[in-house]
Amino acid sequence: MMEEAGYRDPRAVAALLRAAKAEAASLHRPLVLMEVCGTHTHAIAEAGLRGKLAPEIRLVSGPGCPVCVTPVGYLDRAEALARQRNAVLCTFGDLFRVPSSTGSLERLKAEGGDVRIVYSPRDALRVASENPGREVVFLAVGFETTAPTIAAALVEAEGAGLSNFMILPGNKTVPMPLRVLAGDPALRLDGFLLPGHVSVVTGSEAFSFLASDYGIPSAVVGFAPTDVLAGVADLAAQRRGGRAGVSNLYGRAVTPQGNAVARAAMDRVFRPESSDWRGLGPIPESGLLLRESLAHRDASRLEVDVPVPEEPAGCLCGEVLKGAVEPPACPLFGTACTPDLPVGACMVSSEGTCAAYYRHERWRLAGGAA
Ligand code: SF4
């Protein structure tokens, strides 16, 4: 296995860049590839790959930031649980500053709401055991990577008889939105760089439909510059050769079948259901709801008045999330909206596309060095 430094070796990066651009140049049109995962978006931005691959290859970002694709109504409901039922909200830090219709979890906490940042669902279990008289609601947001640990926490709560531990179901799964994007004629995507972490659980074969149903090549890749560029070169070669398949280039972590134990843990607790994605709308079988046997742990069933959801005015986050526009197309980017004063979710999250562009790419876009 390559040493970590080898994945960033400048000569290897330069060689892969040349190979990818040469493959794409023979197509005589820009190759449009989507990186699905927010961690890839940041890795690409940090290494300046977007600028280096242009103009032969255009990398666009997809809906791979779980906080960003969580609709504003989810946060509104969470805030209502705290305000109207005095529930304790436990959340990962990424969600804390995301704007809701009326504020954010951060503002709710400043106003006296009980919002606690946790690092795992088990931390929320501990909060529940320490506060037996209160409803403790874990905000369950994330993809296939986080769902198994949430499932394990729910099983543990059942075993321990922690009746006050609940979740607000918001987990989503990645394959179905890729069907929506692959079938969108306006996007004209030539290939997908598939999410490495999610693929550890799903397996690379879970994405074979992109080739069989849409004729679009895809590649599972890791997060170092050489990983990403190897994927880009692979997709360009598939396109040039008139082929479409799913290539697993992250074999040090991903297998074709994925992690069956993690998926079994999810299946025990969750069932697939339609889910609302910011930017993409409702998508069948793209969300994870609790099975009926665990309905008593579903905080979305608790009675609260929830306001009509309102997206932040002027924010194009929904368009950014489906690769229809790049963040600088938003008039608020870098002026009214920055990581310190974010208007939309895509500027808040550490995996958000607008945050990645702001941190790493605004110099290139302003005409400076990549
Ligand atoms: Fe929304 Fe800010 Fe991104 Fe514009 S720059 S799309 S306001 S998050």
Image: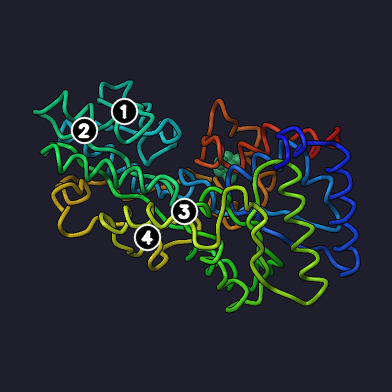
Q: Where is residue 173, by image quadrant?
A: bottom left
**Local crowd size for mark 1, using a 10 Å CA cut-off: few (<14), some (14–19), many (≥20):** some
Name the residue type under label 4.
Ser
Q: Tell which circle, 4 or 3, labels the residue nearer the N-terminal end.
A: 3
Name the residue type under label 1.
Leu
Label 3 CB less than 8 angstroms from ligand 1: no
The residue wearing badge 1 is 108
Which label sits in the foreground, 3 or 1? 3
Q: Given contact means CB atoms under 8 Å apart, are the residues at marks 1 and 2 in contact?
A: yes
Q: Tell which circle, 2 or 4, labels the residue nearer the N-terminal end.
A: 2
At 79% from the left and 40% from the top, the residue drawn is: 365
Which label sits in the foreground, 4 or 1? 4
The residue wearing badge 2 is 83
Name the residue type under label 2.
Arg
Q: Tell which circle, 1 or 2, labels the residue nearer the N-terminal end.
A: 2
Q: Is residue 299 left or right of residue 348?
A: left
**Depth check, front residue: 309 or 274:** 274
Placement of 274 over or under 311, stated as above or below: below
Which label sits in the foreground, 3 or 2? 3
* Cα distance between the residues tagged 2 and 4: 25 Å
The residue wearing badge 3 is 201
Q: Given contact means CB atoms under 8 Å apart, are the residues at marks 4 and 1 in contact?
A: no
Q: Tell which circle, 3 or 1, labels the residue nearer the N-terminal end.
A: 1
Label 2 CB less than 8 angstroms from ligand 1: no
Label 4 CB less than 8 angstroms from ligand 1: no
Give x and y (percent) for residue 136. Answer: 20, 34
Ligand 1 visible in quadrant: top right
At 85% from the left and 36% from the top, the residue drawn is: 10
Q: Given contact means CB atoms under 8 Å apart, are the residues at marks 4 and 3 in contact?
A: no
Which label sits in the foreground, 4 or 3? 3
Name the residue type under label 3.
Val
* Cα distance between the residues tagged 4 and 3: 20 Å
